[in-house]
Amino acid sequence: MLTTSDFKRGLVIKLDGAPCLILDVTFQSPSARGANTMVKTRYRNLLTSQVLDRTFRSGDKVDEADFERHKGQFLYADGDRGVFMDLETYEQFEQEEEQFAAVSPYLLDGAEVQLGLFQGRMITVEPPNTVELTVTETAPALRNATATAQTKEAILETGLKLQVPPYLESGERIKVDTRDGRFISRA
C-alpha cells in the first residue's frame, strides 16, 4: 500500500482496477485550521490512455499496480500492429493498431524500447526520448537561409512528417524528440 506522500511523477498506481501512470502531483495546504492537505494528481489510465484528474486527502492509501518495466526491442510491423520482444524473457508481444500508431513513426526494426507489462500483458511501449532518422524527402536547401524561424517540411524514413530548418537536404541523418515529434539537430 502506498500513501499520498509517496506520490511522484512516473509512479504507477492502481485506481478502479486499472494501472494509472501519475503525470503530475501538486500538494495544497488549506488555510483553515485542522483541514487536511489535498493532493491533486493528473494521471493516465494505461489501459484506455485516458488522462484524468483526481484529488486525494493527505494520508489516503492506494494500491501499487502490478506493473513492470522491461527492456524490449521492436522486431517488425505486421500490418497495423507492432511486434515487440522482451529482452529479459525473449517473449514476443503484439501491440494493437491504436497504440502502435502513436509510436510507429519513431521505430526502425531492431530499435530498443521500454515495455510496460501489467499482469504479464504488454500495455505500453515507450521509445527512447530521441531517435536518429534519415530524411528521405524534402525541398532543396535554400541558399542564404537566415537563422530565423523559417522551416520546411521533411519526410523521414519511417514516414514521419515534421518541420526542419531550411538548410537540411535529403539523405541527412537528424535527431528527433519522440515526446513531441520535433527536430532537435543533425546527427
Image (cartoon, rainbow, N blue to C red):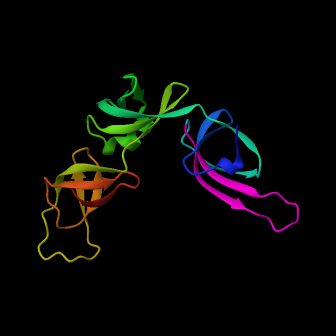
Name above or below for residue 91 compared with residue 125: above
Please name whichever residue, 139 or 182, is drawn nearer the observer in this view of the structure.
182
User: Quadrant location of residue 152?
Assistant: bottom left
Quadrant location of the N terminus in the rendered image: top right
| Residue occupying image coordinates x 63% and y 55% | 25
Q: Percent position (x, y) of residue 95?
A: 42, 31
Queried whether the magenta region covers residue 43, the answer comes back as yes
| Residue occupying image coordinates x 26% and y 67% | 151
| Residue occupying image coordinates x 20% and y 67% | 166
Q: Percent position (x, y) of residue 82?
A: 36, 31
Queried whether the magenta region covers residue 182, the answer comes back as no
Name above or below for residue 52 compared with residue 114: below
SS majority, magenta = strand
Name above or below for residue 144 compared with residue 187: below
User: Quadrant location of residue 64?
Assistant: top right
Please name whichever residue, 4 or 186, is drawn nearer the observer in this view of the structure.
4
Quadrant location of the C terminus in the rendered image: bottom left
Q: Percent position (x, y) of residue 159?
A: 26, 46
Q: Is residue 93 left or right of residue 140?
A: right
Q: Percent position (x, y) of residue 47?
A: 55, 35
- So how many labels did they put on this image? 0
Please name whichever residue, 141 or 179, is drawn nearer the observer in this view of the structure.
179
Residue furthest toward the right?
A: 33
| Residue occupying image coordinates x 60% and y 51% | 8
* Span highlighted in magenta in the image: 21-46
Q: Is residue 161 left or right of residue 18?
A: left
Q: Is residue 17 left or right of residue 164?
A: right
Please name whichever residue, 156 or 33, is drawn nearer the observer in this view of the structure.
33
